[in-house]
Image (cartoon, rainbow, N blue to C red):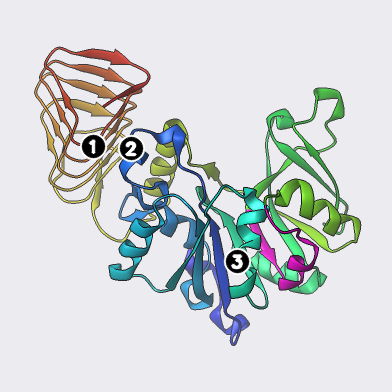
Amino acid sequence: MHDAFNKKQFVGLFMQVVVLAGGVGSRMRPWTNTIPKPLLPMLDATLLERVVEGIPSDLVDEVIVAGGYKVEQIRDYFRDANVDFDVRIVPEDEPLGTGGALGNCRDVISGQFACFNGDIVSSLNVGEMLEQHKMMNVKGTLALWEVEDPTRFGIVGIDEKRQITQFKEKPKPEEVFSNLINAGSYLLEEEVFEIMPKGKHSLERDVFPILAEEGYLAGFPFEGYFIDAGTPQSWHQGVLQCIESNRFSSGSVSNGSWHRKEVSNALNSMIEQGCTIEGKVSDSTVLEGAKISAGAIVQGCLVGKGATIGSNAYLENVIIDHHAVIPSGYKQTQGSFS
């Protein structure tokens, strides 16, 4: 993705990037009981790195993680990780909402900055978005994604100049005025903190409508792909999209599957190193050191680190905990196994 940007255009412009990662990842439990969602591996990078890589590394000054769940693990990981940016953790002692979490960072942010929801995997071209943001001289630009059914989302209306004119949260069918939704990726100026209340609040409900009313908020529709990778199903979509888009720098692909090292017969899956795949695996993510025994069938599953699945077991759409042991012949569809 980085090839799409011309560094010369942005010489002298470096941004801080805020990643809103305050959630506990409840929809990915039991995986997230021990590993915070930002550190879950999506191919050869963590989910947090996938979120940030939409901005060319030569534009990123510092990544600020606004979070409250297992932040020490995140801090420890990035202390030793080989990444192109510095990481600062701004802890969230209690749930503050998207606005409160960002507001918590006001003392460490200066100038123009980017802000991303913590589980977004997309084809957003931040370079083009940045050009528009500067040209329109606004205080905020929101990435916008078009959907067929906008009634499940917060929708956004824009005029012919891409100025945002209205918002509506989860509209009824007769209230729909746009198929564009907020894609959880923003470019903002530090002046936004002046209109943000202290404590718990929402960017979407309490901040952006004020900016729009003042004429300081723009929208940037984009095409390609947009995945909110916070559920097992959307996680798998993110994995497949990263494989299709070659968003990896190590490992290899065969049968539509990415393998960190050892190649298996798995189909459309992600297989980390040290795994033993003797059974049939499809549309699944299998983490480091897991074993799928002969005769087992694993479809649409998330298999945790060091888990063992016994022979002739049948598992479909199950989240299997790290180091779990599933007996031979066991069958389960849906849910989780700890």
In the visual, does 176 lie left or right of 253? right
| Horizontal and vertical percent position of residue 184 | 63, 50
Is the residue marked by circle 2 packed among few (<14), some (14-19), or many (20+) residues within 10 Å?
Answer: many
Tally of numbered discs: 3
Distance of label 3 from label 2 (alpha carbons): 28 Å
Please name the residue shown 60% across and 66% down the image: 105
Earlier along the polypeptide chain: callout 1 or callout 3? 3
| Amino acid, disc 3 | Cys
Q: Is residue 188 magenta?
A: yes
| Amino acid, disc 1 | His
Residue that label 3 marks: 105
Q: Which residues are magenta?
A: 185-199
Earlier along the polypeptide chain: callout 3 or callout 2? 2
Which disc, if any, is residue 31?
2
Residue extending furthest right? 214
For the C terminus, the quadrant is top left
| Horizontal and vertical percent position of residue 142 | 71, 56
